[in-house]
Amino acid sequence: MGQGERMKRLSILLIVCVGLLSGCPQTGDVKEPEAVTAAQEHARQVAEINTKLGIEYMRQNRNEQALEKFEKALASDPGYAPAPGYAAVLYERIGRLDDADAAYRRALELEPDNASIRNNYARYLCSHDQFEAAEENFRQVIANKLYPTPEIAMVNAGLCARLEPDLIKAERYFNDALTTNPNFAIALYELAKLAYVRNDYLQARAYLQRYFQVAGYSPASLWLGVRVERALNDPTEVARYTYLLKSRFADSQETRLLNESQTDGRNTN
């Protein structure tokens, strides 16, 4: 598989936990503090500061500066798990995949119960077709009672299952996420897409309506709405979604697909 296809797969699994970058919770072992020297305490502080700076640079897409800060953090305190955990995501971004894998493994060696890092590693494994290993890591995250948002791992596991492809397994994970958090927008949208694929258009409509209530409109959800309502032969709703898509997201790929479908009469998937 080429680098372009690798990055496409990485983009499919959208929920990446990078601490301050996304606000994802961090959970790991709760350990009693150990006696440390002043030098060790200083090294940890330097690692923490540089890791936070690296995250901020990543958020700004300043990858070179982020890499510099992560490497300083790693050099300062090799035992500080967040530094390799977050650096791994940057290594993925810039295509240093061997370094990413090694960094994930090092982070989990230091903090095996850090659910945010394990979620990211599972996503990484899935993007490289290691579906069984990915699911095992997602399941460890889901089972972690200290992790306050297991629905994130459930949706990622569902997205991974869809790549296998195993749509039955994917639907099960999306439903688990929705049971855990009934207003989790991504789960609602993914279930709407699955319902549309299996021609259950009323169910797809129901999920989409719930999605719109929670998350509002997006180009992808409106385009799905157009196709669902076409299948249900509801011209009023088709017209409404068409207007919203064209007026709010005129330059989107979904609007282009809509225009093409109107030109040649196709119900483009």
Image: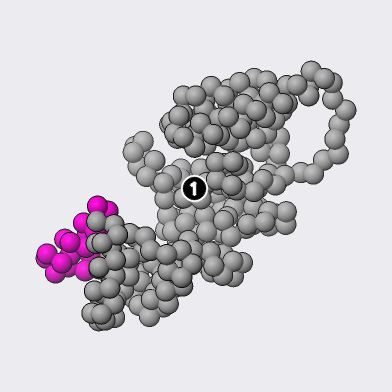
Picture residue at 38% right of the left edge, 76% below the top: 205
| Residue at disc 1, secondary structure | helix
Residue 119 is a magenta residue: no
Where is mark 1, residue-wise? 126
Pick out the residue farthest to the front: 247
- The reply, left or right, for residue 86 in relation to residue 205 is right
Stretch in magenta: 251-268
In the rendering, at what x and y percent does residue 43 appear? 73, 21
Q: Residue at x 43, y 44 (%)?
A: 10
- Quick check: 62 above or below 167? above
Residue 243 visible somewhere in the drawing: yes
Residue at image x 82%, y 40%? 31
Relative side of 248 to 260, left or right: right
Image location of residue 235, percent across then percent down: 23, 79
- x and y percent of residue 258 in the render? 21, 63
* Residue positioned 63% across, 57% down in the render: 149
